[in-house]
Image (cartoon, coloured by chain):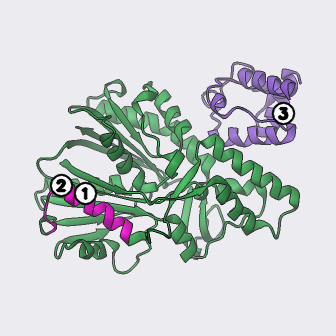
């Protein structure tokens, strides 16, 4: 399976750290004391600084961006770059976590907008690992020779979803902010990739994943008021909740061992990898992971978290495309894409460029 | 503040038995403390003592002894 092209789109709107803390204060000022609000503001601001985030990408009113338009822009770039006519694309797989479509699939609407009249079009949800999982699924179709060209696409627009579902950031006490922090560092963008059975600039050699279900509720985003008996945040969930402490500690503890085991199975080692592209949770997480792999920090040079935030499924393809644009990838380079997502799941994809 | 007093503050803030703490311990590698909990602890210290750690420096600090030295230096320079 080959990567024929990658397209992406990041809207030019930005939400600053102070914008976010203002929203947080607005949503909680009625039930907190002045001292609590003052601590909440200070604590959030400093946590953002420690995590290394300055702004989050978001749709701008000037450009009229929205979920569908951003996904279309990224997909068109991938199609144009590949030089493949839309009618030759056999399948479209869409994977955004913040996909607002329940009926029909977003994929079928996107296919229509792109002029792909017939084919296999469907959505999948594998949280932040959705794009990598799409590639895994596409690989099965390409390997079986059922399809020749597959478009995998994704888009994230968390602030639109927040507005649509009217989700505030209500917390009961100042410590509870840690269960909301993940929702305050999210960003907006779209990405798409054409995968083909032959040709292309990157050959995907291996994909591996590890899933455990014990911490299924580590992070939750449901329709408002969804009944979820036994979930750690209550029996009904409204808004975006996550256990950042559990996620970050599990990731640093479990993911390196998984990566090293998979690399060994594939006859590779961490030192032979030229470029690491990691899911964007800040450089302190990426570098802690690199340290555990005994890999040079300079091999993970692309950090979009500072400017765009965590764009969930969009992070990895965007960062790979940026690395290519910036000339950071040479022919023959060994590239490792590292994905972590809630469930908890870890995924690894190896490419030879 | 002495190192023993600092240890009690760490013990209280992160819920760790203070007899386990010494200058050479790493939060992440030896105690398995996640980065968000460490950030929480540092932010509470900052807010209580009215100073700021250097963000770039904080991730380079390898053990409790270095955090204590940075903390006392910041307090003295306040």
Q: Mark 3 points at which residue?
A: B9
Q: Which chain is the one coloured green? A: A
Can residue A75 be found in the magenta stretch?
yes
Horizontal side, residue A34 vs residue A154: left or right: right
Q: In this view, does B32 lie above or below A241?
A: above
Q: Mark 1 lies on which chain?
A: A
Chain B image colour: purple
Which residue in the protein does label 1 denote? A78
Q: Is residue A236 visible?
A: no
State the image coordinates of residue B4 (x, y, percent, origin top left). 86, 23
Q: In whole angstroms, how far apart are the C-alphas of marks 1 and 3? A: 54 Å
Q: Position of residue A220 (x, y in %)?
A: 55, 63
Q: What stretch is highlighted in magenta?
A: A69-86
**In this rendering, position of residue A118 left or right of residue A21:** left
For the residue pair A50 and A230, the one nearer the viewer reads as A50
Lateral position of residue A35 relative to residue A262, left or right:
right
- Report the front residue among A12 and A306: A12
Q: Which image quadrant is residue B58 in?
A: top right
- What is the CA distance from the residue labelled 3 to the residue labelled 2? 59 Å
Q: Is residue A237 magenta?
A: no
Residue beneath disc 2: A82
Of the residues tagged 1 and 3, which is closer to the observer? 1
Contact? badges 2 and 1 (CB < 8 Å)? yes
Q: Which chain carries label 2?
A: A
Query: Which sits in the foreground, A125 or B54?
Result: B54
For the point 19% across and 43% down, the residue is: A201
Chain that bears disc 3: B
Badge 1: how crowded within 10 Å, few (<14), some, or many (20+)?
many
């Amino acid at each position: 399976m080959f990567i024929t092209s990658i397209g992406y789109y990041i809207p030019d709107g930005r939400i600053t750290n102070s914008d976010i803390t203002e929203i947080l204060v607005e949503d909680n000022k009625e039930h907190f004391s002045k001292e609590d609000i003052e601590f909440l503001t200070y604590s959030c601001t400093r946590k953002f600084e420690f995590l290394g985030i300055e702004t989050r990408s978001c749709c701008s009113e000037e450009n009229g961006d929205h979920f569908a338009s951003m996904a279309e822009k990224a997909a068109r770039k991938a199609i144009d770059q590949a030089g493949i006519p839309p009618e030759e694309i056999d399948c479209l797989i869409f994977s955004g976590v913040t996909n607002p479509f329940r009926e029909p699939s977003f994929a079928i609407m996107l296919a229509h907008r792109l002029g792909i009249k017939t084919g296999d079009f469907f959505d999948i949800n594998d949280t932040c690992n959705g794009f990598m999982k799409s590639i895994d699924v596409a690989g099965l179709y390409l390997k079986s020779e059922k399809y020749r060209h597959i478009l995998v696409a994704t888009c994230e627009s968390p602030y639109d979803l927040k507005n649509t579902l009217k989700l505030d950031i209500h917390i009961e006490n100042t410590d509870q902010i840690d269960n909301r922090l993940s929702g305050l560092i999210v960003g907006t963008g779209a990405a798409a990739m054409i995968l083909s059975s032959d040709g292309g600039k990157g050959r995907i050699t291996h994909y591996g994943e590890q899933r455990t279900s014990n911490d299924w509720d580590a992070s939750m985003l449901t329709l408002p008021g969804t009944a979820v008996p036994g979930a750690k945040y209550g029996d009904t969930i409204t808004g975006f909740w996550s256990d950042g402490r559990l996620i970050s500690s599990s990731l640093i503890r479990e993911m390196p061992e998984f990566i090293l085991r998979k690399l060994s199975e594939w006859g590779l080692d961490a030192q032979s990898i030229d470029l690491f592209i990691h899911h964007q949770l800040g450089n302190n997480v990426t570098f802690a992971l690199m340290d555990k792999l005994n890999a040079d920090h300079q091999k993970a040079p692309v950090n979009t978290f500072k400017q765009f935030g965590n764009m969930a499924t969009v992070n990895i393809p965007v960062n790979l495309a940026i690395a290519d644009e910036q000339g950071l990838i040479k022919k023959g380079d060994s590239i490792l894409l590292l994905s972590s997502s809630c469930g908890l799941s870890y995924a690894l994809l190896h490419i030879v460029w | 503040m002495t190192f023993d007093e600092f240890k009690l503050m760490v013990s209280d803030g992160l819920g760790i038995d203070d007899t386990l703490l010494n200058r050479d311990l790493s939060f992440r590698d030896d105690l398995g403390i996640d980065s968000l909990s460490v950030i929480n602890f540092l932010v509470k210290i900052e807010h209580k003592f009215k100073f700021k750690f250097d963000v770039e420096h904080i991730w380079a600090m390898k053990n409790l002894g270095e955090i204590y030295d940075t903390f006392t230096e910041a307090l003295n320079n306040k």
